[in-house]
Each structure stands twice: as C-alpha cells, then as structure tokens.
Image (cartoon, rainbow, N blue to C red):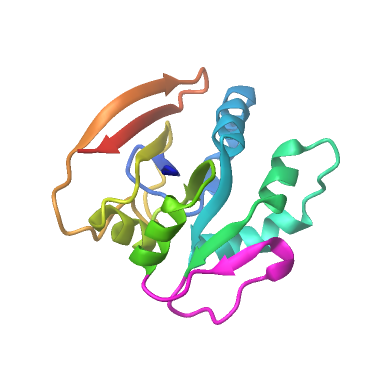
Amino acid sequence: MRKIIESTFVTIDGVIGEPHLWGGPYWDSEHSGYASDLLFDADALLLGRETYEGFAQVWPTRPEDDDPYTARINAMPKYVASRTLTQADLTWNATLLEGDTTEAVRTLKSQEGGNILKFGTGPLSHTLLDAKLVDEYHFWVFPALAGRGDRLFDTYPAITHLTLLGTTTFKSGIVVHRLAPH
C-alpha cells in the first residue's frame, strides 16, 4: 500500500499562508535537499484546490533546464480534490478526484506505486486526518513570525495526538517534525 506524506511549511506562530513572503530567507541547500528527497521518493502529488491553483500558475512556467526538482513536479501525476473545479489542467498531468474524496484517496493508496506527496494544509487535510489516510506529516517549522494569515489546522475541531517519528534541524533554523497519527 502506498503512503501519503503531507509536507507543510509553518511559522512559529502557526501561519501556513503565503510561505513565499516569510520562507524565502531560509531556502538553502539543506532545505532543497530535504525537499528533493521527499519529492523523488514519491511518484504522485495530492493537492487541494487552493494549492493546486497556486502551483498550476507557477510551476509550469518555471524553466526545467538544469532543475530536476521543477522537471519532476511538472512531470508527476497530480490528483486534485475539489468541490468547485469542474476540470483540471490535463497538460500539467492533473486529474480531479471524482466522487467521495475519502474513497478516491483510499483507492489511490491501494494502487501499486510509490509515496503520494501532499503539499499544503487545508480542508483536504481535515478530511484525510478524519479518515486516518495520512501516514506521515512533515511540518517544516520556520523561525519566523507572520502575525496573520491562514493557520495550521485552525478550524480543526478535535484534539488529535501524533507520534514523533523524528526531527531534522537545518542551520537556517528550520526544524522539520516528522509525525504520524496514532
């Protein structure tokens, strides 16, 4: 069975929104190496609508020459969960999940293949957490205070305990907590 691994950037004050505004100073070779390992250990992406729309505006426009990370993201199949989109960009290897999201993700997990990497945290994350479909969370805690913005699991109504699988600390101050649901 494939694993779903969620990777999310978060500030010390819990903000996940607009990481391009607060994350840039910390994106270095250690950051890139860890991100590449996650990406190249996966063979598909799982995205919520907002993350998909943001990524679809940026990644296809980035030059792939001498950038294996960009080439990999652009080439990978992407599965998009949305209640509002009626179609995905097929030229960017995107497919909308049809029917019940939980069942569609269960079906993806049961297929042959490598890990499924999920970027971002939002309504899809709540659905997956409720259904116990995420196998690992990689929360990248940045040494920054954003003050305002979308917050990590801000509206999640239930207390949920996670098991620490490990941590990775970068010289920049980022600490990645690798966690799993009980």
Task: Count how many numbered circles sit on residues in the image.
Answer: 0
Q: Is residue 90 magenta?
A: yes
Residue 148 in the image: above or below residue 3:
below
Residue lying at 58% horizontally and 30% vertically, measured from the top left: 37
- Find residue 178 and report its horizontal and vertical position in percent: 36, 31
17 relative position to 54: left or right: left
Q: Quick one: quadrant of the C terminus?
A: top left
8 relative position to 172: left or right: left
- Find residue 149 and report its horizontal and vertical position in percent: 40, 56
- Find residue 140 and report its horizontal and vertical position in percent: 43, 35
Residue lying at 55% horizontally and 28% vertically, measured from the top left: 34
Q: Residue furthest left?
A: 159
The part of the chain drawn in magenta is: 82-100
162 relative position to 176: left or right: left
Q: Quick one: quadrant of the N terminus?
A: top left
Residue 173 in the image: above or below residue 63:
above
Residue lying at 54% horizontally and 35% vertically, measured from the top left: 38
Which quadrant of the structure image shows residue 176? top left
Q: Nearer the viewer, residue 68 or 24?
A: 68
Give the dominant element type of the magenta stretch: helix, strand or loop: loop
71 relative position to 102: left or right: right
Residue lying at 71% horizontally and 52% vertically, measured from the top left: 74
Q: Residue furthest top?
A: 171
- Find residue 120 and report its horizontal and vertical position in percent: 46, 52
Q: Residue furthest right?
A: 65
Q: Nearer the viewer, residue 171 or 119?
A: 119
Q: Is residue 85 magenta?
A: yes
Q: Nearer the viewer, residue 162 or 156?
A: 162
